[in-house]
């Protein structure tokens, strides 16, 4: 029952965050100048249904469990804690519905383990300027962290780092690579 309340509260916070108009968002991330300057298509022309073409479980179920050192629940593909990557649509820092349960599970774990710390790493694809991608990666990480804080995660448990385009998950210069690079990663520090 407690997890259901957690998921409900997280879903409500996601709706509140997504309800903000573009005027309320950081203009440097939404004014479209980077798209025009770099020739990037917007999400409406990318042909993707959720920004990635895959659901959260499909994209995270690659057999790679970067937080497996934390315990068996972090490498159990049936446990949302095994998923540590949150993917985003092009030029967006809005968390997709597929990833809300994953964020809720990590938030609940952190609340139950107040001594545990994570680094929230924000990333972008190679399109756009370096500065733009650093800012967008930071916004992506902050979006995930703000959803976790609604669930009771403390400021001291989370550090935000943005790598922009500097640490791609996939080397390549096509949509398949770019969609894997538009992400935030939850990295646990020790056990």
Image (tube, rainbow, N blue to C red):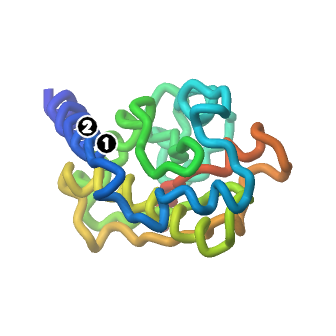
Direction from residue 12 to residue 74 in the image, left or right: right
Q: Please give the name of the residue rendered at 77% of the width and 37% of the height, measured from the top-left corner.
A: 176
- Judged from the image, the secondary structure of the residue bearing numbered disc 1 is helix
Image coordinates of residue 130 in percent, x first then y, are: 67, 72
Q: Is residue 2 above or below residue 131?
A: above
Q: Quadrant of residue 19?
A: top left
* Residue 110, percent from left and from top: 30, 55
Secondary structure at badge 2 equals helix
Q: Is residue 188 above or below residue 93?
A: below
Residue at the spot 44% in from the left edge and 70% down from the top edge: 160
Instruction: Check disc 1 and report the residue beneath it.
Output: 18
For the point 47% across and 57% down, the residue is 30
Label 1 CA crowd tier, 10 Å (few <14, some 14–19, many 20+): some
Residue 190, disc = none
Q: Position of residue 109 (x, y in %)?
A: 31, 48
Is residue 150 depicted above or below 2 in this figure?
Answer: below
Q: Residue furthest right?
A: 172
- State the separation of the CA atoms marked 1 and 2: 5 Å
Figure quadrant of the C terminus: bottom left
Residue nearest the observer in this picture, 40 or 101: 40
Check if mark 1's residue and mark 2's residue have beta carbons within 8 Å. yes
Residue drawn at the location 83% of the way across and 52% of the way down: 171
Find disc 2 in the rendering and name its residue: 15
Of 155 and 11, nearer the camera is 11
Residue 121 coordinates in the image, percent (x, y) = 53, 63
In front of the other: 97 or 119: 97
Report whether residue 119 is seen: no
């Amino acid at each position: 029952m407690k997890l259901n309340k957690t998921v409900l509260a997280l879903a409500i916070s996601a709706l509140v965050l997504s309800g903000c108009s573009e005027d309320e968002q950081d203009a440097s991330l939404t004014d479209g100048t980077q798209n025009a300057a770099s020739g990037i298509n917007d999400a409406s022309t990318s042909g993707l249904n959720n920004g990635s073409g895959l659901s959260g479980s499909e994209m995270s179920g690659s057999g790679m469990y970067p937080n497996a050192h934390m315990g068996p629940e972090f490498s159990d593909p049936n446990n949302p804690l095994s998923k540590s990557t949150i993917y985003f649509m092009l030029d967006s820092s809005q968390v997709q519905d597929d990833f809300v349960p994953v964020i809720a599970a990590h938030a609940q774990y952190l609340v139950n383990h107040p001594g545990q710390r994570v680094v929230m790493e924000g990333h972008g694809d190679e399109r756009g300027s370096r500065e733009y991608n650093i800012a967008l990666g930071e916004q992506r990480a902050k979006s995930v962290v703000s959803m976790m804080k609604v669930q009771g995660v403390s400021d001291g448990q989370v550090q935000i780092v943005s790598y922009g385009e500097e640490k791609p998950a996939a080397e390549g210069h096509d949509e398949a690579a770019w969609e894997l690079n538009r992400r935030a990663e939850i990295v646990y520090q020790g056990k």
